[in-house]
Image (spheres, rainbow, N blue to C red):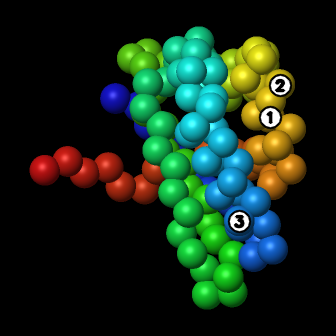
Amino acid sequence: MTSTAWTFTIPQDRVQEFRDLLADLNRDHLPGLDARAREVGYHRERMWLQPGEDGGAEFIVYLEFDEGVDLADFSERLLAYESAFTRWWTPRFASFGIPTTFGEPLLSWDA
């Protein structure tokens, strides 16, 4: 199984706006997220907000890829994928800043 994670900072004055965006996603747009995931090659996505001492938060995303998916190809497919969902999601999500790289794996451990 191949996976990746990435993070970026949500400023204090936009944390509630970001929570509202994710609530909209969860309530009304999961079918579009699911279709995008299947098309670009991942099957599991987890998202967290880690509160910061300054009132902001770190947004953390974890993805598990389908068998044989290459990380470089994946990022190209993800950025190129277009649908009604991405026309709704991408401008809203991008307003918070989109990371240009994925996290560097340092430890992978299973019990």
Q: In terms of secondary structure, where does tag 1 sit?
A: helix
- Name the spot of residue 89 as percent of width and height, x first: 76, 34
Identified by mark 2, the residue type is Arg
**Residue at image mark 1:** 90
Residue 43 visible to the viewer? yes
Q: Is residue 42 left or right of residue 16?
A: left
Q: In terms of secondary structure, where does tag 3 sit?
A: helix
**Foreground: disc 3 or disc 2:** 3
Task: Give the crowd class for mark 1: few <14, some 14-19, many >=20 residues within 10 Å.
Answer: few
* Discs 3, 2 touching: Cβ within 8 Å: no
Identified by mark 3, the residue type is Gln
Q: Is residue 80 left or right of residue 105?
A: right
- Pointer 3 or 1: first along the chain: 3
Please name the residue shown 70% across and 48% down the image: 21
Q: CA distance from mark 3 to mark 2?
A: 22 Å
User: In the rendering, which numbered label is found on residue 87?
Assistant: 2
**Residue at image mark 3:** 16
Q: Nearer the viewer, residue 105 or 38?
A: 38
Question: Does residue 80 lie above or below 101 as drawn?
Answer: above
* Discs 2, 1 touching: Cβ within 8 Å: yes
Q: CA distance from mark 2 to mark 1?
A: 6 Å
Please name the residue shown 39% across and 17% down the image: 67
Considering every residue shown, the one lying at the far left of the view is 111
